[in-house]
Image (spheres, rainbow, N blue to C red):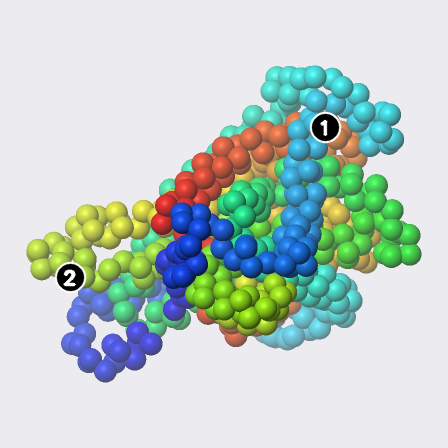
């Protein structure tokens, strides 16, 4: 069901076509020597224009975030930008009552996603991979939340959690004054309530990634293991899971990124009120809130950037290195 | 297809299988429960639920909330806004990223791995990392006469640009892997025959990439439709919001009537659900196309 052919053997193109290998070992030259001047110009534009757009809007702004993090600026006129060194970071780390809770919540977000919906998604994928009837129907149900926007998910779960009218409180009779359980407002509860909604979505996502990974497992491995008399769990543990390693790497990276990106759901739920602060919410509050503290907001963004790059760069370098070797 | 196979074989039904089906069916039902609950709430008049409570047997089930939400909050207008953003954004993203992919996969100019790295890493960043300078930049760029607001800020054009810039990373990555699979002789022969690079791209390479492009188009449409954050920050006039972000304002307006909000939220989910059910294969393959690496 997945068209994962294109990823099976990348770099097929790196093998020199017969007859063109005249200039000995300079394989990666490709078609280059056949190009006219006009072709070179076309190529330059084809690669250049998208790169300029991407770099200008994504990387220049990311660098600008770093630069602005060392300044204070009210956003009115460039003269007003003042260099303040590490002041923003100092204030952030020592004097912001929301910062450390936000870091903690981002970490909790990741830990919950990796410990509950991820194994559940894997479990469902293993079950659905067994050539059972209605497999597609089940898959559709589990995957449905992944196609919905986080905003819609937020509204749907509000109907479940609303203290007055929500499903849970209505069912357990906690919607009367005096017995209220405030799933959305109570700082001890709201993060967990939101994480249930987030896990609801994450499970389906992980299931699909693992299903794709399981399709790539050689059936002969399974048979060999069965012939050896291994049980279902042993086969999974000793044979299937180790071969899922590439998928596990992706799942880990995707889950970390999701935990760092978490925003929409919380914003729709309670705007990141006490108990649900996240780094992404703090950054945004410094732009669209009343007080526009550009330098300070950027300092929070830099923290987010550094954590993200610490994950993204090793992952991509490993991926591309493998590809080059292939 | 797996079901057809199972039927043909007529393997004797084992109790373990039945247990598995019971488990999966109840899990699937539990997964749909929040959505079904939203549908149920949206189908009931507010007066009835406020009187009898939400967990109660219905006296009347009507589509009134849906029609009210649709007309009162002028949803056609917001759907229009979304189309204005999503259609150009999807097309431009595919166009630009396929060009980069073509360059990277067919012409090994040494920078290609680096270029791909830049694009892919950019796509993985959280949006909030770049939002502060981006917001300032959008306020600074004056475009009198080109956008309604006279700036990049608060315009459909601004949203299209950031969607394209952000999403082209993922697409370039997927498409370059796809193009690397195409036989090298194909373009080599055409080049020897004197075809231009543009022809190579437009008439030879692109038509062969249709499956990957279709998968990516489905994925991108849903992602851009579902975007909440860019529009929340980069659009200031409520009137200019795309539907997903507009939902937030609507809920503020009608916060006293949860049934109406439920109906509104469900209406905004309809287009993605249609796309998903019609093009499920494309969507899933697009998602795993990029992820099946490592």
Which residue lies under the disc numbered 2?
A: A223
Quadrant containing the N terminus of chain A is bottom left
Tell me what residue is drawn at x 56 percent, y 25 percent: A100
Residue B82 is labelled as none
Q: Position of residue B281 (x, y in %)?
A: 46, 69
Task: Answer whether residue B82 is visible to the viewer in this image.
Answer: no
Farthest bottom residue in view: B8
Q: Nearer the viewer, residue A176 or A111?
A: A111
**A78 up-or-down from B252: above or below:** above
Q: Is residue B67 above or below residue A91?
A: below
Label 1 neighbour load within 10 Å: few <14, some 14-19, many 20+: many
Q: Chain of mark 1?
A: A
Query: Disc 2 to disc 1, how far (Cα)?
Result: 59 Å
Q: Chain of mark 2?
A: A
Choose top left, top right, bottom left or bottom right for residue A322. Answer: top left
Residue B186 visible in the current orientation: yes
Q: Position of residue B212 (x, y in %)?
A: 50, 66
Mark before the other along the chain sequence, 2 or 1? 1
Q: Is residue A158 left or right of residue B260?
A: left
Q: Circle 1 is placed at which residue position? A: A68
Front in this rendered view, residue A167 or A1: A1
Quarter of the image where one finds residue A293? top right
- Image quadrant in which you'd find residue B203: bottom right
């Amino acid at each position: 069901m997945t068209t994962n052919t294109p990823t099976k053997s990348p770099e097929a193109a790196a093998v020199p076509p017969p007859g063109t290998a005249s200039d000995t070992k300079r394989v990666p030259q490709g078609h280059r020597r056949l190009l006219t001047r006009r072709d070179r110009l076309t190529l330059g534009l084809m690669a250049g224009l998208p790169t300029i757009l991407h770099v200008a809007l994504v990387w220049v702004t990311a660098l600008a975030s770093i630069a602005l993090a060392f300044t204070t600026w009210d956003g009115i006129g460039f003269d007003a930008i003042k260099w303040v060194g590490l002041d923003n970071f100092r204030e952030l780390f020592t004097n912001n009552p929301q910062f450390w809770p936000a870091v903690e919540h981002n970490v909790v977000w990741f830990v919950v996603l990796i410990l509950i919906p991820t194994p559940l998604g894997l479990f469902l994928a293993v079950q659905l991979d067994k050539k059972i009837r209605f497999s597609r129907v089940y898959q559709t149900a589990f995957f449905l939340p992944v196609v919905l926007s986080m905003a819609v998910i937020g509204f749907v779960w509000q109907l479940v959690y609303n203290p007055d009218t929500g499903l849970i409180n209505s069912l357990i009779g906690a919607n009367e004054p005096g017995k209220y359980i405030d799933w959305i407002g109570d700082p001890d509860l709201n993060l967990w309530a939101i994480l249930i909604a987030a896990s609801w979505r994450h499970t389906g996502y992980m299931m699909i990634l693992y299903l794709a990974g399981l399709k790539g497992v050689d059936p002969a491995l399974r048979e060999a293991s069965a012939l050896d008399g291994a049980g279902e769990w042993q086969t999974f543990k000793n044979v299937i899971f180790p071969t899922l390693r590439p998928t596990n790497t992706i799942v880990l990276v995707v889950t970390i990124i999701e935990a760092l990106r978490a925003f929409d759901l919380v914003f729709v739920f309670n705007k990141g009120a006490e108990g649900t602060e996240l780094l992404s919410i703090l950054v945004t509050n410094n732009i669209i809130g009343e007080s526009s503290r550009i330098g300070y907001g950027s300092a929070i963004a830099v923290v987010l950037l550094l954590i993200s790059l610490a994950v993204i760069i090793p992952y991509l370098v490993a991926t591309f290195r493998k590809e080059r070797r292939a | 297809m797996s079901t057809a196979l199972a039927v043909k074989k007529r393997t004797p039904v084992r109790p373990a299988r039945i247990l598995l089906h019971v488990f999966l069916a109840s899990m699937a039902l539990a997964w749909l429960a929040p959505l079904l609950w939203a549908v149920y709430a949206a189908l009931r008049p507010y007066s009835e639920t406020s009187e009898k409570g939400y967990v109660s047997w219905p006296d009347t089930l009507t589509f009134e909330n849906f029609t009210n939400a649709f007309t009162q909050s002028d949803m056609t207008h917001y759907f229009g806004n979304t189309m204005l953003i999503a259609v150009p954004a999807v097309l431009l993203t595919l166009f630009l990223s396929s060009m980069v992919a073509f360059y990277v996969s067919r012409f090994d100019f040494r920078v290609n791995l680096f270029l791909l790295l830049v694009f892919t890493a950019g796509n993985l960043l959280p949006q909030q990392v770049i939002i502060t300078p981006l917001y300032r930049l959008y306020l600074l760029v004056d475009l009198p006469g080109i956008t309604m607001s006279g700036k990049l800020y608060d315009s459909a054009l601004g949203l299209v640009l950031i969607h394209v810039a952000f999403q082209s990373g993922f697409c370039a990555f997927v498409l370059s892997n796809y193009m690397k699979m195409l036989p090298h002789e194909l373009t080599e022969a055409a080049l020897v025959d004197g075809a231009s690079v543009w022809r190579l791209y437009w008439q030879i390479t692109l038509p062969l990439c249709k499956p990957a492009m279709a998968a990516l188009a489905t994925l991108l449409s849903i992602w851009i439709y579902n975007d909440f954050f860019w529009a929340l920050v980069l659009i200031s006039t409520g009137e200019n919001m795309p539907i997903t972000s507009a939902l937030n304002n609507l809920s503020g307006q009608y916060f006293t009537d949860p049934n109406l909000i439920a109906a509104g939220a469900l209406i905004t989910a309809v287009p993605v659900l249609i796309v998903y059910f019609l093009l499920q294969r494309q969507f899933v393959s697009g998602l795993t196309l990029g992820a099946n690496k490592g």
